[in-house]
Image: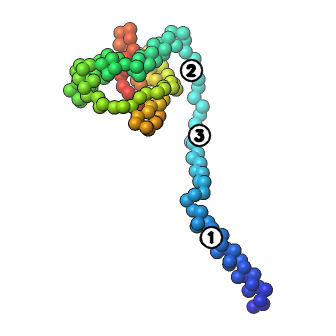
Amino acid sequence: MPKDKVALILLIGLIGFTVVAHAQKNFGIEQEVVIQHRTIEQPKEKRSYTTQEINMIKAAKDVVKKYWMSSYEGIYGLLSKKYKERLKGTRSISTATEYKNSMPVTERVWLKQTYQKADLQRDDLIQVVVLAEWEEEGYEGVMTFVFDMIKEGDTWKIENIIF
C-alpha cells in the first residue's frame, strides 16, 4: 500500500479517536433537549356564560379565595355536608376543632394563587383550578389544586379538593 494512503488512513483514525475522546470527556455537561409531542386534539369550543352563570362562578371562586385565608376551623365551615361525612367516616372528624387538630403543624406559607380555570359543569357543580405558589423552610414550589364546588342551598361549598 502506498505511503500516502497509509498516512491518510492513520490521520483519519487519529482524528476519529480525538473526536471520540473529546465527546466522552464532555459527556454529561452538554445541553440536552428532549421534545415531547402532544397528541393532536380538537380545539375545545369556548363556552359563553350568561350573566347568572358568571355570578355563580364568581360566588364559587369567592369560597375558594376564603379557603386560602381561613384558619382550619374556618375551612371546615367551607366544606360540603358530603365532604364532612367522608371526614367523619374515614378519619373520625366531626367538628371544626377535630379538623384543626388533625392537620400537621407546618411552616408552609401560601404566597400567591392563580385561578387558571373555572368551569360550570352543572347548575350545582363548578370546578375551579388554582395554581398555588408556596414557600416552606427555604423551599419554594407550585401546586395545582382542583376544587369541586357544590351548591348547598344558596351557598357554594367545597365538595372535593384534588392536589
**For the point 66% across and 70% down, which residue is it?**
19
Q: CA distance from mark 2 to mark 1?
A: 57 Å
- Marks 2/3 in contact by CB < 8 Å: the verdict is no
Q: Amino acid at mark 2?
A: Arg
Earlier-in-chain disc, 2 versus 1: 1
**For the point 25% across and 28% down, which residue is it?**
102
Q: Mark 1 packing: few (<14 Cα in 10 Å), some, or many (20+)?
A: few
Earlier-in-chain disc, 2 versus 3: 3
Location of the C terminus by quadrant is: top left
**For the point 28% across and 21% down, which residue is it?**
84
Please state which of residues 121 and 91 is positioned toward the viewer in this rendering.
Answer: 91
Does residue 44 appear left or right of residue 160 in this picture? right
Location of the N terminus by quadrant is: bottom right
Label at residue 20: 1
Q: Which residue is mark 3?
A: 40
Is 155 placed above or below 131 here?
A: above
